[in-house]
Image (tube, rainbow, N blue to C red):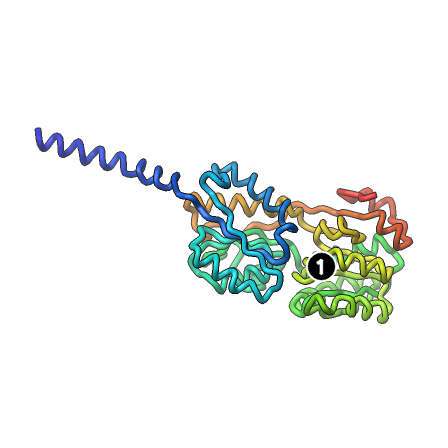
Amino acid sequence: MRRSALGLLVALGIFLAPLVSDAQQAGKMLQVGFLLLGSLDSYTRAVEVFRQALHEFGYVEGQNLVFEYRVAEREKQLPDLAAELVQRRVDVIVAPSTPAIRAAKEATTTIPLVVMSMLDPVEARFIETLARPGGNITGVAGPITGAFCGKLLELLKEAVPGIARVAVLGSPTALATYVRETAVAAQVLGIQLHPIEIQGADVLEGAFETAANAGADALLLLPTPILAMNERRMAALAVQRRLPAIFFRRSFATVGGLMAYGPRGADLWRRAAALVGRILQGTKPTDLPVEQAMSFELVINLKTAEALGLTIPPTLLFQADEVMR
């Protein structure tokens, strides 16, 4: 009888152990850290998309999940903020910009990182390959390559057929990475490129003045955190200098820029949330290939076109996903 009772207790223990573990896991308040550059307000829409996407995995903020935000106004603040998230032992860190990715990568090799990189994450040496990222990183990669920047140049030429000289604004890294390949498209289009380095927000007005003085007919704005953080200011400066401009973020057109073409931001955040959901359920980042952006949008601001004295060709308007009037 005693042996039978003992055997029954052992069997019950084996059966109940996973249930107890699951119950403990269910009662745990998981933490997702966000390492952001700019202002929290600028991420409101994106975070809401992210929050809704996590619901599909059973994670609800305030019930079994908490968001920890660390927001840097300046790039140099990111390492300290990344260290704070590590000290809080968050379960995963979301880094949606190249400087944030770099800071998070240097801060931890153990906490999973879900990144959204507009740069090539392999070329930037964040991961080994898209299929096998290695280490503690996975995420979603944008298509920002020289070929993609060439596409931006083509759209700019289609919008303003008469342009012959285009100023290319970007960080030293962005210029070194993309201008050579973009030059191939420029040659085909009969456009001369004029690279201008942007190393801080304090040089933006000077950069636009340099572009105008160099005889630029238009502006190609490369993926650069400083530019992304100052879209409204760039849009205003472009109109002031009467320079048609294109950027890869939809928000550039919504704040007064002429054109924007790039990955749908909501789609990137939704897919990033799916990766976070899988990690919280136990999948290792190294087993999750880095995904690539598949959905793109073209946005044209006709109010800005009118302010610049431009008439956008109907064929281009037909291609646009959104025309702001």
Bin the neighbour count of mark 1 within 10 Å (Cα to Cα): few under 14, some 14-19, many 20 and up.
some
Horizontal relation, residue 227 to residue 240: left or right: left
Q: Locate residue 12: give its quadrant.
A: top left
User: How many marks on residues?
Assistant: 1
Horizontal relation, residue 309 to residue 229: left or right: right
Report helix, strand or loop for mark 1. Answer: loop
Residue 55, visible in the rendered structure: yes
Q: Residue at x 76, y 51 (%)?
A: 255
At label 1, the amino acid type is Asn
| Quarter of the rendering occupied by the C terminus | top right
- Nearer the observer, 234 or 275: 234
Q: Position of residue 311 (x, y in %)?
A: 90, 50
Q: Residue at x 42, y 54 (%)?
A: 89
Q: Residue at x 68, y 60 (%)?
A: 223
Residue 289, visible in the rendered structure: no
Q: Position of residue 266 (x, y in %)?
A: 63, 44
**Residue with the most extreme top position:** 1
**Residue with the most extreme left position:** 1
Q: Residue at x 57, y 44 (%)?
A: 50
| Quarter of the rendering occupied by the N terminus | top left
Q: As displayed, is residue 279 above or below residue 246?
A: above
- Nearer the observer, 149 or 114: 114
Q: Position of residue 134 (x, y in %)?
A: 46, 58
Q: Which residue is mark 1?
A: 230
Horizontal relation, residue 304 to residue 228: left or right: right
Q: Position of residue 242 (x, y in %)?
A: 87, 60
